[in-house]
Amino acid sequence: MHADALLLTRATGLRLGELRDLELDCVHEISGHGAWLKVPLGKLASERMVPIDEETLHVVDRIVARRTPGRALPHPRTGRPTEFLLCRRGGARPVRPTGSSTAPRAEVITSRCAISAAQGVGAAL
């Protein structure tokens, strides 16, 4: 799933926080205009819709098929129960990096995703 998360980020230009906050129903079909990804509030404090092609739609479908079903969790901004696209085993959300030294840094998470993606396409590391 890490490789697909990296592919989704690359295809859509998402920031890591936006990727982490994607909801399970983030893909919207707009008649006559194709599929769009609803990107949640992020660094710029605004939602946006990003057009996605068929290949990116298949990436999202693979993530949904592989995700661990979990219970809805309180959304960090609104508090409403929300099912997120990316979940770890047991339904927990991926860790949000904080200032503590024990939390994974965004660079480490990105590197792990890149390594997983490269290995998935047969690249030697």
Image (cartoon, rainbow, N blue to C red):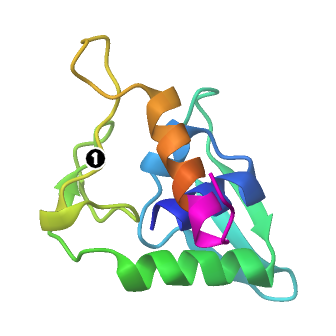
Residue 7 lies, with reference to residue 97, above or below; the image says below
* Residue named by callout 1: 75
Closer to us: 25 or 65: 65
Magenta stretch?
117-125
Q: Is residue 79 visible?
A: yes
Q: Residue at x 47, y 75 (%)?
A: 63
Residue 73 percent location from the top left of the image: 18, 56
The magenta stretch spans residue 123: yes
Which amino acid lies under the numbered mark 1 shown in the image of this protein? Answer: His
Q: Is residue 41 visible?
A: no
Closer to us: 5 or 57: 5
Closer to us: 18 or 62: 62
Give the quarter of the figure containing the N terminus: bottom left
- The quadrant in which residue 83 appears is bottom left
Q: Helix, strand or loop at disc 1?
A: loop
79 relative to 53 in the view: left or right: left
Residue 125 percent location from the top left of the image: 62, 51
Residue 123 lies, with reference to residue 115, above or below; the image says below
